[in-house]
Image (cartoon, rainbow, N blue to C red):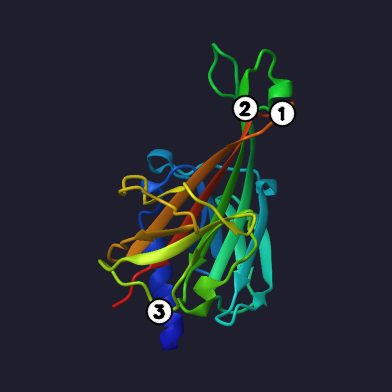
Amino acid sequence: MTAIRSRVATALAALAFGMGAAQAHNVWLVPDAQGAYLVQFGGHEGKLEEFNSSKLTSVTAYDRRGRKIDVATQAATDGVRVKPEREPAMLAAEFDNGFFSKTDSSAMVNKPMDENPGATSGVHAMKFHKTVLQWGLIARKELGQTFEIVGTQSKDPQAGKPMQVKVLKDGKPIAGVRLSLGEDGTPVTSAADGTATVTPVEGRNQLLAIIRMPVQGDPKTTQRSYEYLFAFQTHD
């Protein structure tokens, strides 16, 4: 095993360990024993949830130079299995969790408002993910996701040392987005230029961000929710 391959394997293993314990509902990738990656969904109270594979709208892989790597996907009993053609430096995914709505007197159900009689509010839930396996210029690459977190530095993040990221909506910096390292981390808010500063912990880090935006004139929903999980590993 090469040094880079060993480092990637170590990073993935650390990111996978305890992944669900500190998440809101999100989507992420973990390694499997065959050298592929498993797309998983869930997170509330550390519980994984089954999902229809059609909700996974995109999964991509990139090398250190930012070039796309072909991936093969296959539905599995424990998620969706993703096999890049060669070793990736970064993985990304997009997930459409569908529509939810409620009436004034009922709990949220997994239906759009126009299929839930009496519904007064609704949300369309979109999830986005990125795992940086080999930090470098690739960490600063903008993928064009509707909602996205990108790094602003090329050097490896260090535990206990502040690092800056940038939050984008439709490719443009967005202010006022709440971010935290895990659900229990101290929240910070993105500035006018989209940047925010966080302090990574030792080992695995999952930077979470969420925005909810009102929707007008759509019979299915009154708002859209965008959630992001940006995963990376600190190094010595």
Task: Name the residue located 44 percent from the left edge and 88 percent from the top edge.
Answer: 2
Instruction: Tell me the quarter of the picture where residue 118 sits.
Output: top right
Q: Disc 1 versus disc 2: distance between alpha carbons?
A: 7 Å
Residue marked by disc 1: 220
Say which element carries label 1: loop
Image quadrant where one finds the N terminus: bottom left
Say which element carries label 3: loop
Location of residue 99 with respect to 130 vertically, above or below: above
Going from the N terminus, do you reach mark 1 or mark 3 first? 3
- The amino acid pointed to by label 1 is Lys
- Side (left or right) of 40 relative to 16: right
Looking at this view, name the residue that lies furthest to the front.
192
Looking at this view, name the residue that lies furthest to the left.
160
Query: Residue 45 or 148: which is nearer the viewer?
Result: 148
Q: Disc 1 versus disc 3: distance between alpha carbons?
A: 44 Å
Where is residue 191 drawn, in percent x and y? 44, 54
Going from the N terminus, do you reach mark 1 or mark 2 first? 2
Where is residue 112 drawn, in percent x and y? 69, 27
Crowding around mark 3 (Cα neighbors within 10 Å: few <14, some 14 to 19, many 20+) is few
Residue marked by disc 3: 155
Q: Residue 122 carries which label?
A: 2
Crowding around mark 2 (Cα neighbors within 10 Å: few <14, some 14 to 19, many 20+) is many
> Do tag 1 and tag 3 residues touch (Cβ < 8 Å)?
no
- The amino acid pointed to by label 3 is Lys
- Side (left or right) of 180 relative to 29: left
- The amino acid pointed to by label 2 is Gly
> Do tag 1 and tag 2 residues touch (Cβ < 8 Å)?
yes
